[in-house]
Each structure stands twice: as C-alpha cells, then as structure tokens.
Amino acid sequence: MNRRLKSILQKTDLYHPLQTSYRAGRTWLTNQLYKLTYRPHKGPGLTCNFCGAEYKKFVPEVPGPDIAPAIQGNNVIAGYGQNVYCPRCLSKNRERLIKAVIEKYLPLAPAARILHFSPEKNLYRWLKHHASITTVDTAPRFYTRIDPTIRYADATRLPFNNHSFDLVIANHILEHIPEDQMAMHEIHRVLAPEGIAILQVPYSPTLPATLEDPEIDDPGRQAALYGQQDHVRIYAFADYLRRLAKAGFNVHVLNPEDLAEFRIYATQPTESVFLCYQH
Ligand SMILES: [Zn+2]
C-alpha cells in the first residue's frame, strides 16, 4: 500500500479494518483457487487433521529469492516445503503438527486454561471447543476476525498473574522478539507448576551459534539475514535449548522420528517440537 495513503488511513483509524478486510478477501479468493486447482489431486495420501480433507498433495510454499539464501544456506527448519497448506481449509503444516502433538501427548482437561499467542485460525477454533482460551498479540486488531476478544499483550511483560495457564502456545513467535529471554521468563512465570508451553521457532540444526545482531533494524536486511523481514534472529538448535533452560524450563524435545506418525497430516518432516515444562 502507498505509504502516504497508509499514513492517512492510520490517522483516521481505518487502516487496520481495511487491511484486515483486504487480507480476508485475498485469503478467501486464494482458498477458492486452491479448491479448484487441487480437485484432481483429491484422494488418499495426506489428510488434514482439521477439516478431514484427503489429497495426494497439499499446497507448497517455497522461500522467495530474497530470503532463500538465509533459509537454505543455514538449513533452517522454517515451515517451507512441498505440502504446507491444506487446499480445503488452508491450515498450515505447523498448525496441524501442534494439533497432532496435543492430541497424542497433552490431552486437555475440560477446564484447561490456554494462552495462545497470535492465534492461528484453525488451531484456535479447535482449541476453543476443548478448553478456556485467551489470545494475545501486539497488534490484536489483525486477529479480531479469528477471536473478537483477543487482547493486546507484550510477551516480555505479560498482563497475567503467576501460574495463570496450563498450556501456552507460541507457535513461531519468539524469533520476532528482540528480548526473547525476557519473553521466555514471562511465559514460564504465567504457567501453572504442572503447565507446559509449546514454543516453536524456526531453527538451524547446523548453525554453531544463534544468528542475531541487535544493531540491525531494517526489514530488508532482516529478510536477507534471517529469512523474514520481521524476524530478529535464526536460532541455533542447541542455543535455543540453552535459552529455554535459562528461563527455567525443563525441555523435552520430540524429534522428527518421534513425530513420523504425523506425516500423514502433511507435517514438516524435519521439524522437532519443543515441549517446555514449567518444572
Ligand atoms: Zn483442511
């Protein structure tokens, strides 16, 4: 959008509603297109664990040329691949993985209290039927179509009492936060003593150290360095675990081999899941 027009709309408070409607319209159109073009690929092979659709292949998402060197050069497990979006409901591979993990490993008590950062539509709607769920984001107006009750929250200063939640889901959030260690401490603080956080991030299994530079505050450079213009780092796998432990978490990693049974849901074959226990 033109910068001047954007500035005028922001002053009149129309920017977010228009932006949200535009995005919703674009998503709807994309969805119709996928449903049509993937009709020939219907059939057994991959199943969406949200809508139940079966296709021989899902919709791919590959990194563009501006970010491919950062993603591929650092072997980042970032969610790209050949089977990313369900053609029918547009669920993403990382949502389907979290649902499968919760169903198998973290059965939810009916009274479970969940905190969901930047809620993904399909995951949120499914969780809502099973538990009491609170959603937060730093730009809540972008999510009101998913949850009208979403509230503003800065992950480094969460507006919740200690031990308020049984499950926290921050699915690809921490890589956006400069003070990630503080956010990890906050998530640990608001978790109940028996609580668990699922804290997924893009990470590199081969980088010797986390790639980050607090001096860099430029979307173009961030895209080229980290693979997305609003990311502030690429975590090295071992360093990510170290930071979680420093925040007080007892981390259990589900490796790709542990998650192989979920491949039928077109999950990312190389992704690990970080189950972070409060104690
Ligand atoms: Zn689906």
Image (cartoon, grey):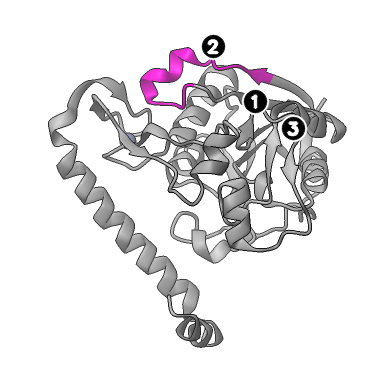
User: Cβ of disc 1 within 8 Å of ligand 1?
Assistant: no
Q: Are marks 2 and 3 in contact (CB under 8 Å)?
A: no
Residue 178 rendering spot, x and y as whole percentages = 75, 53
Residue sitting at the far left: 40
View quadrant of ligand 1: top left
- Residue type, mark 3 in image: Tyr
Residue 240, numbered circle: 3
Q: Are marks 3 and 1 in contact (CB under 8 Å)?
A: no
Q: What residue lies at 60% left-to-right and 56% top-to-bottom?
A: 230
Q: Is residue 193 visible?
A: no
Quadrant in which the C terminus is drawn:
top right
Residue 257, numbered circle: 2
- Residue type, mark 2 in image: Glu
Q: Is residue 273 above or below residue 182?
A: above
Residue 1 rendering spot, x and y as whole percentages = 43, 75
Considering the numbered disc 2 on the image, is that residue within a helix, a strand or a loop?
loop
Numbered disc in front, either 3 or 1? 1
Q: What residue lies at 54% left-to-right and 11% top-to-bottom?
A: 257
The Cα–Cα distance between marks 1 and 2, rounded to whole angstroms, is 15 Å
**Residue 263: in magenta span:** yes
Numbered disc in front, either 1 or 2? 1
Residue at the disc numbered 1: 205
**Residue 78: in magenta span:** no
Q: Mark 3 Cα within 10 Å, few/some/many (few <14, many 20+)?
A: some
